[in-house]
Structure formats: C-alpha cells, structure tokens
Amino acid sequence: MPQAEGGYVSLPAVNGNGSAIYQSTTEPSAPPSVFESVKRVIGQAIKSTPGDSEELLRSERQPVIVGGVSTMPVDPMDDIELRSVQLHFPNARGSILEACDQRRVPTDKGDIHVAIQGDTSKPAIVTYHDLGLNYATSFAGFFNFPVMRGLLENFCVYHVTAPGQEEGAPALPEDYVYPTMDELAAQLLFVLSHFGLKSVIGFGVGAGANILARFAHGHPDKVGALCLINCVSTQSGWIEWGYQSFNARFLRTKGMTQGVIDYLMWHHFGRNPEERNHDLVQMYKQHFERAVNPTNLAMLINAYIHRNDLHLARTPPGTPGTETAATTLKMPVINITGSLSPHVDDTVTFNGRLDPTNSSWMKISDCALVLEEQPAKLAEAFRLFLQGEGYATPLSTPASSPCGTKYHTYSSIFFANFREQQQQAREERDREREHDRQRQLNLRIGNRLRETAINCTNNGSGAEAGDNNNADASEEEEDQENGNGNGNRAYVTTDTSGTLYYGTQSNKIRITENPLPEPVSS
C-alpha cells in the first residue's frame, strides 16, 4: 500500500459504478456476508465486460481505511469491537517511587535510604534487596501485584537500601569504609529506633536475606517473623569468592563489564533465563548497565564475599550443654527458593539449621527469581504465612489466586480474628483458674474449721469433761443459749472486712489459707 509522510493514504480506487469504495469513517460499516459478496460479483461479471469484472474482484479484496488504520474486511462473526481497556492495579515499577515516602536515616556508618510505603500506624514489614538491585527494582513489581496491594492495607512496608545502592546514587568517597555484613545488620537498629518500631516482619532476598537473618539472630525480640528468599547461611566458597573478587576488581577499574553482567544475571536468574522471559532479562540487563554505580556495587560485593557464618545449628532437644533458643532462630521463618535458582542447595543447608517446629522450606517450580517470575504463588504463600502468625489479611480473589479459586477456608476465617479469640480464650482460662482456686480455698477452710473446732473443744472444756464425762450435748447447747456456759465454748465470728475468726472469747484464731492458724489478740 502506498504511504505518505504522515502514514497510510487512501487509494483512488472505484468500483464498477464509479463510486469510491474507501471510507474515512471512524468505525467501519457492517460488511456484507460472503454469500452476498459472491452473488454480487457473479451478477456484475454477467452484466459487465470481462475487464470490469476483474476490476470488481480486485476492488472487493482491497483494504478499507478506518481512522488511518488499514484493515481487511472479514466475516461478521469475526468482528470484535474493543471500546476501552483499563488496568486497575498497573504493575508499573515507577509507581512505587511516587507511592513511597523517601527518608534518610542517620547511622554510625553514614546515612541510609529508607522508603516508606503504607500507613505507619500498621504493623511493619522491613525489606532488604539483593546484589545489584535496590528497593525499587527488587520489590516494586511484587508489591504492586494485586494481592500485595490488598495486603498493604493492613501493613506498612519499610524498604531499606544498602549504602550507595539507591537509584542514581553518587559514588562513595574513596576513603569510605563500607560496612561489613554484621554492621549492615546493626544499621537496622537505627532504622527501628528512628521510626519507633518495636517489632517488625523481615522480608529479604539474597544478600538482604542474609542481613535480616543476622539481625534476627542478634536481636530476636525485634523480629516477629521472617520471609527469606535464596538465603545463604554459610560463608562464601572458593568458587564464589574467586568470581566475585574479579567482578569487584572490574567494577572498580573498568566499570560494568559484560562478564559482571553475566554473573549478576546468573546470580538472579540461573542458567538460560532468555528461554523463560526474554523481556524481563533485557530489562534487568539495562538496569545493570545504566542505573547501577559500579564503584558502590563493588564495595557491597566485597562485603558480601567476606561474610562470616551465621553460626546457626538445629540442636536436638535434650542435648547436654546446649540450648536450642541460643543456637537457631526463635521466630517463625519461611525459607523460599525457585527450582531453577542457583541457590537451592544453600537454602537446603539453611533449612537444616532451623528449628523444624517454627520453620518451613518452600521451592516454587519453573522459576529462579520468584519475585518476578512467580509473584502470584509467592504472594499467596506470604499471605498465608502472615495469617498463620495471627495477622489479619484479606482473602485472595479468583483473579489473584494461582489456582483460580477463592480461599474461604477455616484458617482464613479463624485467623482474621485471631487476636480477639486468643484474648477471649485467655480470659476463660483465667476464670477457670480463679474458680478452681476458690474451690480449693473453700475446702481448706472447711478442713481447718473442723480441725480447729476439735482442738478448741478439747482444750476449752477439759474441766467440765472431768466432772461429768457423760454430759449431754443438748445440755451444753442449752447452757450456751442461756449464757450459763463456762465462757470457753468455741464459736465463729467475722469482722468488717469479712475475715473469719474461730475460738473462744479469750483466744481467737484467724482462719487463713496458711497451714497453721494465726493467733490474734482479742
């Protein structure tokens, strides 16, 4: 079709009657059916010359210009009219930048960047990114996912970025001593203190997962739960140390080379990532080439390869000389990896060091970077994990659920009001304990009354028993009623405070819970 500078132009084609067949309307008129078109062609061919019939056949096949777009006439059953398309939750990475409140938090190793997403009055989730990434490139796509958008209604996310790794960060000074992995974990204390957070939920990937695990191990009272992806709990091996040492040297001297990019792609996506998601791979390559400061990344890589072991161990119960709480993580942990990730073995080793009663290991199929390749499954697992820990989270919808079903399970309904039900259960247990305690107290008082009555009767009325051992009980009661007794008859009285006393006028005994009654002065 001929073209002009502004795009396609209509052809001066006419039909057999000399009228133009092209229309310049915004919507095409309803094309005739195939049967009607055939009848019309045959009729025109019979009434006109052969040259006219051939021209008519060619004109029936010409495209129709509709609003500047070339379309071919099709059967009416194939007509589809697209009015509008609207995406309620766009998975745009740039949208998280506008939705977050950017802060600079001072620490003992310099300021660090923290982005706040959500209502600060809600429970806190602290995220930490992996090598070569920042909070926007690592978590923007995941937290803009529809399920996570609904989850943010009940939580506030604090995205922590390592020093010098934020978007467009300037090069750190040459004399700057980059923090070690333990010092990076200690910086989180300044973040919690700055925002007044008492306990947080950790969400880390790769190197960030290692930092959060260190912080949780050193400060178990500050972390309520952990979600760690591709976490490494051991020190770096010789192969990793060698590759990363060369990468750090190239980043300092030559910048972002192709070898460094290939290693970072393997670190995040494993082998042959182009076969799974070509567009995602190209986007990450462009980020490594254009948006990462090579010098700052070299410092972070150098700190990561010089990490020490987390010193975690799964101690069997009853092992002499050891305590489980002191050797492994106390809080609930969900340990996640992808089936195609190069860190599967590291997560298995890490899982072997955790307490099996409060930890779970999860391998998601057909992915390496689960945040990007399987966000629906990860979001569903994270949502159920939070529900299991007593946090109220919204139910998943059919569109957001990986299985296409809505989860109205007993656990989803129960954990939505978990705290209230637990409070009611505690109050019921307290009432039962108080009832049992009161019943035991009544039994003790009854037994003590009987013992004290016997002792006081034997001691107080000994003389009367010597004169007449066979005195009738009815006579004693009559003497007591007439006031003719000897004054040593035992009786029970109470004071204004409700305290019980048992004994004679000269010797009263307070009735308490103690094994021996306490004598008091009259």
Image: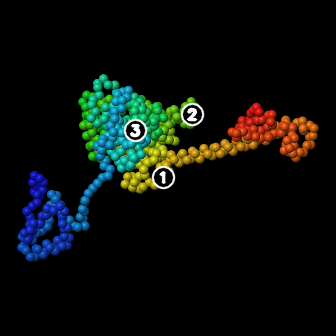
Report the residue marked by disc 2. Answer: 319
Q: Residue at x 56, y 37 (%)?
A: 317
Q: Amino acid at mark 3?
A: Val
Name the secondary structure under disc 2.
loop
Q: Relative to 16, is 225 on the left or the right? A: right
Closest to the camera, between mark 1 and mark 2, is 1
- Measuring from the top left, give residue 347's x and y in whole percent: 42, 39
Quadrant into which the C terminus falls:
top right
- x and y percentages locating residue 453 in the rendered image: 80, 40
Residue 270 visible in the displayed image = no
Residue 406: x and y, percent? 42, 55
Which amino acid type is shown beneath numbered disc 2? Thr
Q: CA distance from mark 1 to mark 2?
A: 39 Å
**Measured Cα–Cα span from mark 2 to mark 3:** 34 Å
Q: Which residue is mark 1?
A: 413
Q: Nearer the viewer, residue 460 or 419?
A: 460
Left or right of 463 on screen, residue 258: left
Name the residue beneath numbered marker 3. 126
**Considering the numbered disc 1 on the image, is that residue within a helix, a strand or a loop?**
helix
Classify mark 2: residues with Cα within 10 Å, few (<14), some (14-19) or many (20+): few
